[in-house]
Image (cartoon, rainbow, N blue to C red):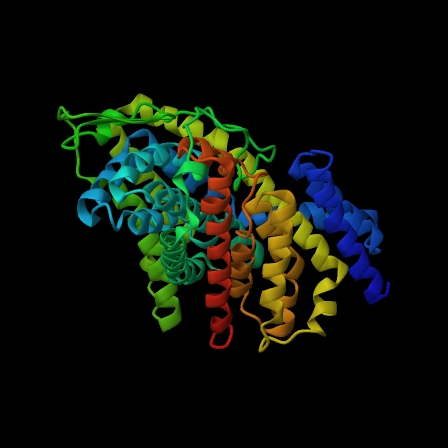
Amino acid sequence: MSDTAILINTGVAVLAVVLLIVRFKLNPVVALVLGSAYLGLSTGLGVDGTVEAITGGFGDIMAEVGLLIAFGVLTGAILQEIGAIERLVATLLRVFGPKRMPYAMSVTIATALQSIYLDVLLVISAPLARNLAPRLGRLGTARMATALAIGLECGIVLMVPGVGTLALAGLLGVPLGRMLLFGLLLVVPTVIIAVAIMSFLFRKGWWDPAKDEGRIDAAGPAGDDATPGNPGPRGDAEPSPSAPDGASEQGRVAATATGTVVDPRPVRDPHHVKLIVLFAPLLGALLLIAAGAVLDITGFQNPVVDFLSQPVVALLAGMVGTSLVGRYTAGRRRVERAIATGFRESGQILILTAVGGSLAATIDKAGLGDILGHYFTAQTAAPLLMVWVIAAVLHIAVGSVTISAITAAGILAPIAPVIGLDPVLIALAAGAGSLFAVHVTSNTFWLLQSLMGQTTRGTLKSCSVGVSVASVVAILLILPLSLVV
């Protein structure tokens, strides 16, 4: 088959996936499988070759990141159940003060809290941010809403153990330690710069509280897309009753859909432990993964360190450690409830991620990598810009951060070995592009509107524009890396 025919059929397959999801409201998993099947059959792989590519890609990606995603989601569910998030926010406020809170909260959400399922993390943190907003002045709602949006969305696709990041790393064969180091190097300045730019715009009169702020609803209209990046219509979700754990010296805090209620009476838990102890297992796991990447670069080898720094071993240890801490502080039943919730939430993430691998494997078998390899070289910015643009366009159409990132990376993953471009750069570029234009098709958009007390106009500014600014900042930071990596 000619190169032109392969390019055309690939474009038709991607467009068909978008139309099936957007126009016909088909489940993204089914749409991706149908797109993969069409591409395989239309490019001459045959029935057997097409089925082999779909099932092989599915199995390969599950073997690569299936357990990692499961362990990450379970760890996050336990941390949410035992009230660690509320306590962390209270600590950040005490350490950084109200004025620096947008930066502190957005960076923390984008890095340390990415094991928390997105809509759970949003429902927990938004009421707390809403409560803090008045202390920042008339622009408090705008700044806190923007900080939440940027931190939440950037972390999903740029920082380990964000579910999108794990999927991209597995899809492109990027060692998780390397993904962690480069993601951390990128996400921190991206978040800080984007929040600073939006704060500057707000101070210049771009935010009108009379028109951009409104009442707080219990739930906003929910998007149709139920994916890891946009977990579906769960705007009426409420955080589980974890306030007593997070309330020690700060008093009893209850995060609800209508705000944060603070009981000033101190509550002493007989099993109260320091905040660092609650997060120590997860932070220890991430440090082990990062240490393995650093030692691999330096050439140091030690059997014990090599074993413990394996991502699946490190995250398993982190999950077990978090479970033990949770049982001590909250009891066995609450930890078991959190684990059951985590298993339910991880199912759709695992299936979607694996099906993204099926599409990428089919594209690879079709020979797209060899074709595109003739047009690009690793010394040019064109491949990374193309990844960013494809992911951005897909996100505008589909409204899912994770689907757009995985699809864009899958399309161009085959060219990485052909032109010598480091796969970690493709992963980061796909993640950055998928952040562009979070809008009304996203469940995150409506949750931020309702929980932060914004009008639709205000949410378009704080969420859509704010996250888009972060997307552009991220690709501008990634491009120079392609010259040295």
Q: Is 314 placed left or right of 8 in the picture?
A: left
Residue at horizontal 44%, vertical 39%? Answer: 212
Q: Is 358 placed left or right of 245 in the picture?
A: right
Count up the numbered dots: 0
Give residue 301's position: percent from left, percent from top: 35, 67
Say which of 162 and 266 sits in front.
266
For residue 289, what is the image quadrant?
A: bottom left
For residue 34, what is the image quadrant?
A: top right
Vertical comparison of 166 with 476: above or below: above
Vertical comparison of 338 with 481: above or below: above
Residue at horizontal 67%, vertical 57%? Answer: 411
Residue at horizontal 13%, vertical 26%? Answer: 266
Confirm whether residue 448 shows in the render: yes
Give residue 284's position: percent from left, percent from top: 29, 50
Give residue 291's position: percent from left, percent from top: 33, 61
User: What is the quadrant of the N terminus in the image?
Assistant: bottom right
Q: Outermost residue toward the right?
A: 1
For residue 213, what is the image quadrant?
A: top left
Say which of 242 and 19 sits in front.
19
Q: Is 340 placed left or right of 364 in the picture?
A: left
Q: Is 190 placed left or right of 401 in the picture?
A: left
Give residue 353's position: percent from left, percent from top: 58, 44
Say which of 63 and 251 sits in front.
251
Confirm whether residue 62 shows in the render: no
Say which of 279 and 152 sits in front.
152
